[in-house]
Amino acid sequence: MTRPKQDESKFKAFMQENVLTMATVIGVFVGGLVGFIIKNSTGEWTKREIMYISFPGEIFLRMLKCLIVPLLVSSITSAIGGLDLSMSSKIATRAITYYFVTTISAVILGICLVTTLRPGQGAKIVETQTESIDKASKVLTPDTLMDLVRNMFTDNIIQSTMFQHRTEIYENTTISPAQPMENWEFKSAQREGSNVLGLVMFSVILGTTIGRMREKGQLLQDFFTTLSEAMMTITSWVIWISPLGVGFLIAAKIIEMESIAATIQSLGWYFITVMIGLFLHGFGTIAVIFFLGTRRLPYSFIAKLSQVLATAFGTGSSSATMPLTIKCLDSMGIDPRVTRFVIPVGATINMDGTALYEAVAALFIAQYREMSYSFGTIVAVSITATAASIGAAGIPQAGLVTMVMVLDTVGLEPKDVSLIIAVDWLLDRFRTTINVMCDALGTILVNHLSKNDLASVDRLSAEPHELLELGTNGHEMKE
């Protein structure tokens, strides 16, 4: 009689721990199913009707995005300020090395797949043109890269919470018509959207300064630590509506598509190539890197991240998913000082899925246009796709602008972005999911490599929640 009771108690405990995760995954599937049913059983929906469907999901997304700036600044500042300089530099070095290796690996994998499968040969694509593509076409690669650096070193931290810097170019036909874009007039502009790169850079510098001030900076350190904990408390409230919000977002997006079957058919091999690349990178390349660093396979950790990954797929934003990722890693026993530094930085600069996607897309379009390309061009695409993925988070209209950069490297017209725009929204969700998974596994890896250093920290000066996490961390990694 004892055995059934034990099994029943274990089942109840499992359901209590994973009810939100299962509800979020169910929300994704139900949203997709409802979207397909509505789309196939009714006539064409207007934009306003689709807006009504997506409204609950929009509210959920707005609530998550509201947490990004205060959580990002407080998390990075408190994490860096709570460590000595040698410790923070070690953690930063390990994290950046991991991000660099995984991004380069993703680009190489994508190029190998697209050159082997050659999805662009024989493709029949209905070309479209949109206003957003026209706007994205009016950029120069040097301007985009310099804007990336300008956004890193912001001149107004308050303004960076709401706007990003962008160089805009325009043709002055009154002086000399038909000039090349390099000779167009240019001006500085502020575009709506948080300058995440600038906020990260400022937070790292502020945290380092607080750490150097020791006792004098303790008041500021306590403030940012408390603010970070308050943001995580709010996050724990918000995540309970994630199943509903994600479901409505997915349903509205499917209803919005003109013809799912026709879109997949025309871009089938391209879609399959990107999906194979994302799957192999997420469950192959990253798994190997994780195993080499921890001597453990990552799949049990990935299972624990299922709610985070489902939310990333539903929202299509690694930044919006960041509060949930930190919350989940905290519950897994990862040291909060590592989590609160590595995750915000990773959500900003680590875009493995985006790098792979842009490398595949550029060579796919080149194949479709029957343009020959050399090994040197492939190397140039690799470097540009890597740089574009790093800058994507800090640039307005990130996907289109960075894609134009990569196409420019191959010598293709910016308007060729229209060839792949039809499936971009769906692939964006898959590559965002891989980005978030890579960030989370990287945090676990960095935490494992840093555990001896973290154990040497004076526990008497640690925060109460840090002592709790330090005590559970070793147990979690040994399971």
Image: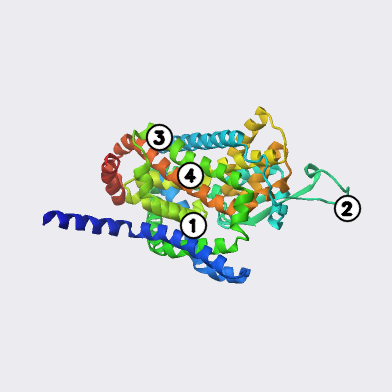
Which quadrant of the figure contains the C terminus? Answer: top left
Figure check: 450 above or below 78: above
Q: Is residue 439 left or right of residue 109?
A: left
Figure check: 414 above or below 53: above
Q: Is residue 462 left or right of residue 274?
A: left
Amino acid under disc 3 = Ser
Q: Which of pointers 3 and 2 indicates the residue nearer the eye?
A: 2
Amino acid under disc 1 = Gly
Figure check: 9 above or below 43: above
Dot 1: element: helix
Residue 370 position by quadrant: top right
Which numbered disc covers residue 346? 4
Q: Earlier in the sequence, mark 4 or mark 1?
A: 1
Dot 3: element: helix
Which numbered disc covers residue 314? 1
**Residue drawn at 69 percent across, 41 percent down:** 368
Which residue position holds label 2? Answer: 174
Q: Calculate the distance from the C-alpha at mark 1 to the C-alpha at mark 2.
A: 48 Å
Which residue position holds label 3? Answer: 86
Amino acid under disc 4 = Gly
Which numbered disc covers residue 353? none
Q: Calculate the distance from the C-alpha at mark 3 to the C-alpha at mark 1.
A: 39 Å
